[in-house]
Image: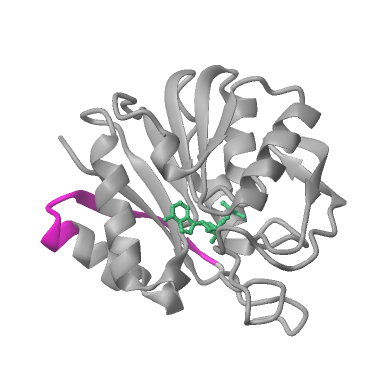
Amino acid sequence: MRPDSPAPDEPDEPAAEHYFSARPASPEQRRPLAVRLAGREVEVEVAAGVFSPGRIDLGTQVLLRTVPPPPADGELLDLGTGWGPVALTMAMLSPGARVWAVDVNARALDLVTRNAARLGLDNVVAVTPDEVPADVVLDALWSNPPIRVGKGALHTMLVRWLPRLRAGADAHLVVQRNLGADSLQRWMADEQGWLCERAASAKGFRVLRVTPAA
Ligand SMILES: C[S@@+](CC[C@H](N)C(=O)[O-])C[C@H]1O[C@@H](n2cnc3c(N)ncnc32)[C@H](O)[C@@H]1O
């Protein structure tokens, strides 16, 4: 770990507040951030109280470099969107698709909505998990999931969302090797019976491709 870099799944803020707080109590301190998304130099807004506000997280970068282009249309989902690097990338690459940017953190949802508007994207819907309509069937799911919520909560999230993929559609998840990527892969394959393979391994992260239903 570089000394100037927070742990990839760590908040850039005091431990008292998690990046997955529903309503962060810290001052928001919104600020611009120049980033490269989907091959374009863009400016987004970030804020304290959301995940990785200083840069695109290294794991997220590995994910975005690895995933194949998303389907051109249909329903795409970014599980745990933060300020939106994954959802915004999907929306830029697939303007004909609808992108569900899902998070429990209200500040994150506000940011991703603002960022989509800033980038002229009208195909991003930023919502809490319960606000995704039950009849939405997913054509792709990308996620840098919140490992730090704990194994039980993480498993519950995955069991809730991955079976919502259309038959044959897949999910791409990036997980730090030191934070249990390999045991998560075994759990998905052995206990859930999902097809799960390592699509990439770079910079201490694994990208797992998961196909829950054949
Ligand atoms: C590791 S961060 C990734 C954020 C963003 N996708 C990125 O790459 O910068 C995980 C995100 O999952 C969110 N999260 C935590 N629990 C969640 C849940 N039950 N459902 C959806 N998102 C959740 C957190 O608030 C956080 O924004």
Q: Is residue 193 magenta?
A: yes
For the record, the magenta segment spans 189-202
**Circle count:** 0
Pick the residue in front: 11 or 66.
11
Q: Position of residue 18 (x, y in %)?
A: 58, 71
- Give the vertical position of 101 relative to 206 (above or below): above
Q: Residue at x 61, y 52 (%)?
A: 82
Pick the residue in front: 92 or 122.
122
Say left or right for 164 vs 25.
Answer: left
- Give the vertical position of 184 relative to 160 (above or below): below
Pick the residue in front: 201 or 124.
124
Q: In this view, which residue lies farthest toward the bottom? A: 3
Quadrant that contains the N terminus: bottom right
Q: Residue at x 51, y 47 (%)?
A: 66
Say left or right for 107 vs 189.
Answer: right
Quadrant that contains the C terminus: top left
Q: Is residue 172 magenta?
A: no
Q: Position of residue 181 (x, y in %)?
A: 37, 69
Colour mapping: one colour
Q: Position of residue 12 (x, y in %)?
A: 71, 72
Please indicate, yes or no, whether residue 39 appears anywhere in the rendered image: no
Quadrant hosting residue 130 = top left
Q: Position of residue 43 (x, y in %)?
A: 84, 41
